Amino acid sequence: MEPESCPTLTRGHYAYDSGDAAGLTPLMLMYTLGRSFVPPRIHAGGLRYHGDSPLVSQLHHEGLVEAIAVPQRATFEAGLTFARAEGIIPAPETNHAIRVAIDEAEACKRSGERKTIFFTLSGHGHFDMAAYDRYLSGQLEDSPCPDEAIKAALAELPKP
């Protein structure tokens, strides 16, 4: 799961890129949007990185895992659903996994398929209450990533 505002696995390229914006790290084979890519500001700050880990990238490249990009508002909706059911306010980064877990469960309910669905609850959202307040007051916007921003950053990737 990843934010649609920083769609590294779903819209990035599998290429060698630096792991940092300054270009000081060794090149790594990963899905990347280009090290100069700057995503829109979203409340899941930990998910705003231009690349993905080489291991996750390889798993995705080989078709062993799939990636889904989700909009910011839908993730907060899922986080509130989880909080109401479990009594834990999840961190915005975790809300992405919760969103897709809920979507998968609803698909199974419709199809009658039985599945065990796992996700990782990676943190609480106590430091993110302002973001939840913005969501609940209708001030939180989805920030889809423009194709032009990705194309411009990818054009700067090192050439093989």
Image: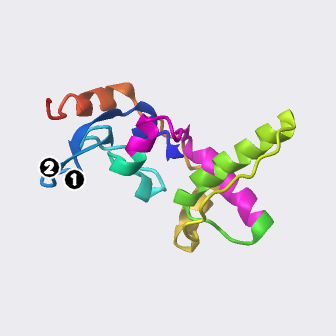
Query: Mostly what secondary structure, the magenta segment?
Result: helix
The colouring scheme, among rainbow, by chain, secondary structure or one colour, is rainbow
- Using the rendered view, name the quadrant where residue 91 is placed: bottom right
Give the label on residue 138, or none: none
Identity of the residue drawn at 22% across and 53% down = 20
Residue 85 visible: yes
State left or right for residue 97 relative to residue 115. left
Q: Which residue is mark 2?
A: 23
Instruction: Please tell me whether mark 1 sits on a helix, a strand or a loop.
Output: loop
Magenta region: 57-84
Q: Quick check: 106 above or below 93?
A: above
- Using the rendered view, name the quadrant where residue 122 is placed: bottom right
Q: Which residue is mark 1?
A: 20
Identity of the residue drawn at 54% across and 46% down = 1
Report how far apart the C-alphas of labels 2 and 1 lie in the structure.
6 Å
State left or right for residue 16 relative to residue 159. right
- Using the rendered view, name the quadrant where residue 90 is placed: bottom right
Residue 6 visible: no
Mark 2 touching mark 1, by CB under 8 A?
Answer: yes
Q: Amino acid at mark 1?
A: Asp
Q: Residues within 10 Å of mark 1 (few under 14, many from 20)?
A: some
Provide residue 62's location: percent of width, then percent of height. 44, 35
Q: Amino acid at mark 2?
A: Gly
